[in-house]
Amino acid sequence: MSGQSAERLMDIILQMKINLVHINETLSQQNFEIRQQVAGVFEGESKSLERCLMSIDDKLKACVVFVDDYQRLHATLSNMREKLIQLGAEPAALPGALLGDGVEEVIAWRMRELRAQEKL
């Protein structure tokens, strides 16, 4: 192999090394940018989940209020119905009481009812 051929071969190898370093830098930069984009999407989705959970919490708090109101109104209506009966009237049927002792049981019962009616 002549001196010029070896020198030319060394130049080609050096150029290949420079190209590989450039490719590696480009891939590293793209990898960094992709990680940042995925991290941004992850953060956004995490916030969406937090908002969903807060919404569920708000609905459950409202449900507790409605269950308490229903039980209070049902008791009042039951007393009224008894008084009407004592006065000789035949009042309409009393709406059903909520099944369950606590809000958790009432919600579970209601969910079963809605599923049975294919509304949930």
Image (spheres, rainbow, N blue to C red):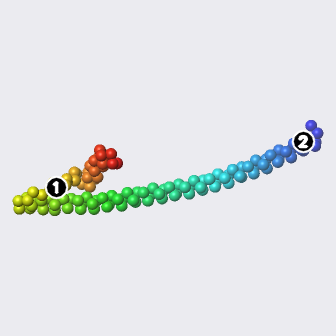
Q: Which mark is on residue 94?
A: 1
Q: Nearer the viewer, residue 35 or 114?
A: 114
Q: Could you classify mark 2 by the number of other residues whose Cα lies within 10 Å: few (under 14), some (14-19), or many (20 or more)?
A: few
Report whether 108 appears left or right of 75.
Answer: right
- Residue 113 visible to the viewer: yes
Query: Counting other residues with Cα less than 10 Å from the Cα at mark 1, is it few (<14), some (14-19), or many (20 or more)?
Result: few
Left or right: 59, with 6 as reference point: left
Q: Quadrant of residue 90?
A: bottom left
Residue drawn at 25 percent across, 58 percent down: 67
Identify the residue at horizontal 32%, vertical 60% (top origin). Answer: 61
Q: Position of residue 14 (x, y in %)?
A: 82, 47
| Quadrant of the frame with the N terminus | top right
* Front position among marks 2 and 1: 1
Residue at 27% across, 60% down: 66
The local secondary structure at tag 2 comes to: helix
Kindly state the secondary structure of the residue where label 1 is placed. loop
So how many labels did they put on this image? 2
Q: Is 34 left, or right, of 83 in this rendering? A: right
What separation in Å lies between label 2 and label 1 (alpha carbons)? 103 Å
Nearer to us in this view, 117 or 106: 117
> On the image, numbered disc 2 is attached to which residue?
6
Horizontal and vertical percent position of residue 18? 79, 50
Residue at x 40%, y 60% (from the top left corner): 54
Residue 51 at x, y = what percent?
44, 59
Q: Earlier along the polypeptide chain: callout 2 or callout 1?
A: 2
